[in-house]
Image: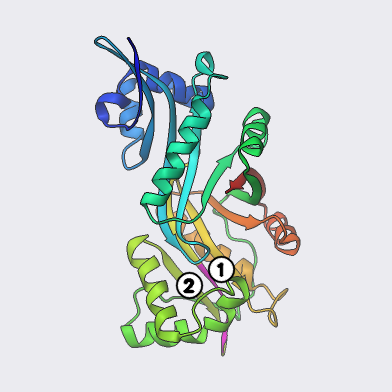
Amino acid sequence: MSNEIFVSFDETLLRLPSCLSVHAQLRPNLSKLTSEDYVQHSNGLHICGIIRKFESETTVLALAVYRTFLTTFDTIRFEIDDIVVDEKERNHGLGTRLLNDLIKKTKEYGATKILVHCDPTNTDAHRFFFRFGLTIYVFEFFLRNNESLKSNDQIRIVDVTELSEKDNAQLLIQAHGIFRQLRPHLPDDEKTYVNQIRDICRTGPARIIVAMNDEILGLAVYRVTRNMKYAEHIYCDDLVTNENSRSSGVGRCLINYMKNEGKKLGIDQLTLDSGCQRGRAHKFYHREGFIINRYGFMM
């Protein structure tokens, strides 16, 4: 009698031919890898799923790749990059079971929301997510280019992350009001706010940069991360320009800085999520060369 269970994947499960085979149904580029290469490619990623045990044989039926990190948007982010059910096992409730198990795991991490990224062409998955009650909440913008565009040379970028504690706090407090233009739910109390941003930078790890002339004009929070779709890339958590300084090149200066940091690391891919309602920001991202590469479904 077979036994189907939800488990976190270790190297033994990742080496199963069925694991790579199922994952390659969603990410065809993975089919070029050997099982050993796939294990190496999966290093540092959280992978879980449903397996079937029958006598001495174990088969992967469905899997998901997720990550968790602190953000200013939802405090604890639980983000699913990949979720796939073996095409031979579909329409038997495995997708529903897997997503329900992931929701339980979300609660274990203390997250209040779950974000699932999905390619725009994967309409079967869209229908499944809609039936489950998820809605498209963000667009993922993607840029493959680390060449800087011409920018305002009167604006300088300062990395706040590793300044002295005093200077770090001073700049974070000066940026508080601008940050709240993007994230109005950030704490009113300056000490609580500073500690929250420092926690994000320390545990992410993430970096916070500010654009300045005589005063702070805008800021960004970014991190180097990786997944199966992009491999290693820069993810920008937050990007905001003071409402009084928009259309003056602040956003481009911040993006150029992240591109340059990526170039130092051999990274030419930059992604960010933007709420569906932020049409003005979307126009800016398109002008900078970004494209919408995935939808972000949220529950």
The answer to whether residue 239 is magenta is no
Q: Eyeballing the image, is 21 above or below 156?
A: above
Q: Locate residue 239 relative to residue 121 in the image: left or right.
A: left
Find residue 272 and report its horizontal and vertical position in percent. Answer: 57, 55
* Pointer 1 local density, CA inside 10 Å: few below 14, some 14–19, many at least 20: many
Residue type at mark 1 is: Leu
1 or 2: tag closer to the N-terminus: 2
For residue 13, which quarter of the picture?
Answer: top left
Q: Which residues are magenta?
A: 215-220
* Count of marks, rendered view: 2
Q: Is residue 206 visible?
A: yes
Find residue 231 and report its horizontal and vertical position in percent. Answer: 44, 40
Which residue in the protein does label 2 denote? 209
Find residue 120 and report its horizontal and vertical position in percent. Answer: 67, 37
**Residue extending farthest bottom:** 214
Q: Eyeballing the image, is 205 above or below 298?
A: below
Which residue is more in the foreground, 196 or 161?
196
The answer to whether residue 216 is magenta is yes
Which residue in the protein does label 1 denote? 254
- Residues tagged 1 and 2 counted as in contact (Cβ below 8 A): yes
